[in-house]
Amino acid sequence: MYQSYPASGPAQELSRVQPPPSVRNAVLLMYAGAVLEVIALIVAVLTTSSLKAAILKAHPAYTAAQVHTAEDSRTVSLVVGAVITIGLWLWMAWANGRGRSWARIVSAVLFGINTLDLVVSFALVHATASMIVGILIWLVGLAAVVLLFRRESGPFYRQQVSPG
């Protein structure tokens, strides 16, 4: 025979430590990063007219059809990349806000990738508006990662969710 769980008394709830200010601010910055990515996408789409000139400068022998194809493929890749990046910002905000320990590391890795992308952009992209937005996004990412790895953030990621 087995004993059942006691039926009397209030139901035990899982306790959860609230994120410290450093994590809350990092999460807010991640949401801001997603908004900046939307702005970057809008800027990129609005400046596609300069893309045609850049393609012709790099490939003067291209036909009109080749230039159009190159414009379209670049625009599609920008949109797809931006949508993925926006999703990653939102996912990291969600995961870090819940104290998922892996999320700090993934956020740092994504920041590293963003840093490499920014360096490559300096070499390839010469659109001032795009570069300004890119630098702003990088700064937001830097601030978020610094906040995530502050000493006061550590216990939030090491917490154990337990009954009572």
Image (spheres, helix red, strand yellow):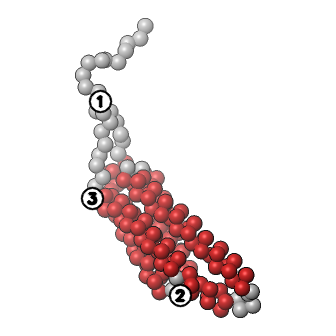
**The C terminus: image quadrant:** top left
Callout 3, which amino acid?
Answer: Pro
**Residue 97: horizontal and vertical position, in percent?**
36, 53
In three-dimensional space, the C-alpha distance between marks 1 and 2, rounded to whole angstroms, equals: 59 Å
What numbered label is drawn on residue 124? none
- Depth check: give the residue in front, 41 or 146: 41
Question: Which quadrant of the figure has residue 107?
Answer: bottom left
- The mark lying in front, picked from 3 and 2, is 2
**Residue 60: horizontal and vertical position, in percent?**
71, 92
Callout 1, which amino acid?
Answer: Gln
* Residue identifier under label 3: 21
- Classify mark 2: helix, strand or loop: loop
- The residue sitting at 57% across, 72% down in the picture is 78
Question: Which quadrant of the figure has residue 62?
Answer: bottom right
* Residue identifier under label 2: 126
Sequence-wise first label, 3 or 2: 3
Callout 2, which amino acid?
Answer: His
**Residue 102: horizontal and vertical position, in percent?**
46, 53
Sequence-wise first label, 1 or 2: 1
**Residue 44: horizontal and vertical position, in percent?**
51, 78
- Depth check: give the residue in front, 56 or 16: 56
Q: Residue furthest top?
A: 1
* Residue identifier under label 1: 12
**The N terminus: image quadrant:** top left
- The mark lying in front, picked from 1 and 2, is 2
Q: Is residue 160 above or below residue 118?
A: above
Whether residue 49 appears in this view of the structure is yes
Callouts 1 and 2 close, C-beta under 8 Å: no
- Classify mark 1: helix, strand or loop: loop
Mark 1, other Cα within 10 Å: few <14 / some 14–19 / many ≥20 = few
- The residue sitting at 48% across, 78% down in the picture is 43
